Amino acid sequence: MRILVVEDDTLLADGIVEALRIESYAVDLAREGVSAENLMYINTYDLVILDWTIPPPTGIELLRSWRVEENTTPVLMLTGRAEVDDCVTALDSGADDYLNKPFSLSELFARVRSLLRRRGKPLQVALKADDLELDRVHRLVSVAGKPVETSPKEFAMLEYLITRQDEIITRTELIEHVWDEAFDSMSNPVDVVIYRLRKKIDGNRLPLLHTKKGVGYVLASQRA
């Protein structure tokens, strides 16, 4: 899952980004409206966390322009405004949810999960492919009932692959959904993570994770 955070408060923005990355989300950060506009034009996001009072265009202006352009990406609006009328304005402008500052990270994560569940297809909490199981809420992976430790990037890639099992996923798709603007194309990170995942979920078993040479990767629903 790839999230855009738009927040000009340096400490808050950096804290949100770090916390979301620890939770295995790919995260891009914009500190003012122009950068957010550019990132939304270039990339596809699963969710936007948008501060109301960023340098122009403001968060509420961005939100209104996205909705006019029929961009339906879920938006969680952050604000220090506590008045009911402000909440109504945000929701009427197209926000999917509204969170007053200050807030706890646990509340932020709960709102993020809720918005992701509301998308076109319900967000399944437990995912399974043969003897591989993935728990999105508790960030757990197991094979044949035995826990498997994964890094945030390994978990994020496996999560994306298992939601698209039996489909060929290109390297470009994985980069767009699992990495953020810090992606280093010179270090082959996709291949490295695929190699580590293959060792962890396949090992000496019949493989679930297959490489389609020159095309991409497939996580099969059955070992073969």
Image (spheres, helix red, strand yellow):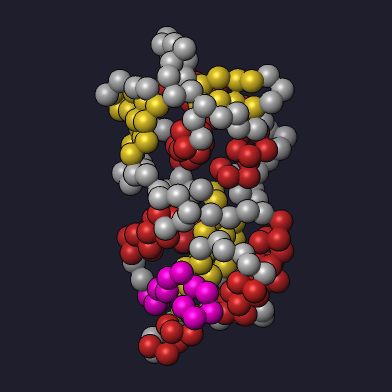
Does 188 sit left or right of 82 as displayed? right
Q: Residue at x 52, y 74 (%)?
A: 94
Q: Residue 13 or 43: which is nearer the viewer?
A: 43
From the top left corner, tell me how far across and down residue 74 is, in percent.
51, 63
Q: Verify whether residue 129 appears in magenta.
A: no
Q: Is residue 98 magenta?
A: yes
Q: Can residue 9 be seen at all in this image of the molecule?
A: no
- Against 65, residue 111 (above or below) is above
**Which residue is at 46% across, 33% downward?**
162
Name the quadrant containing residue 72: bottom right
The image shows residue 113, relative to residue 32, as above or below, that is above
Where residue 109 sits: x, y (%)?
A: 38, 58
Report the span colored magenta.
91-102
Spot occupied by residue 156 in the image (x, y as percentages of width and height): 48, 40
Instruction: Write the residue at 36% across / 71% down.
Output: 103
Q: Residue at x 71, y 37 (%)?
A: 185
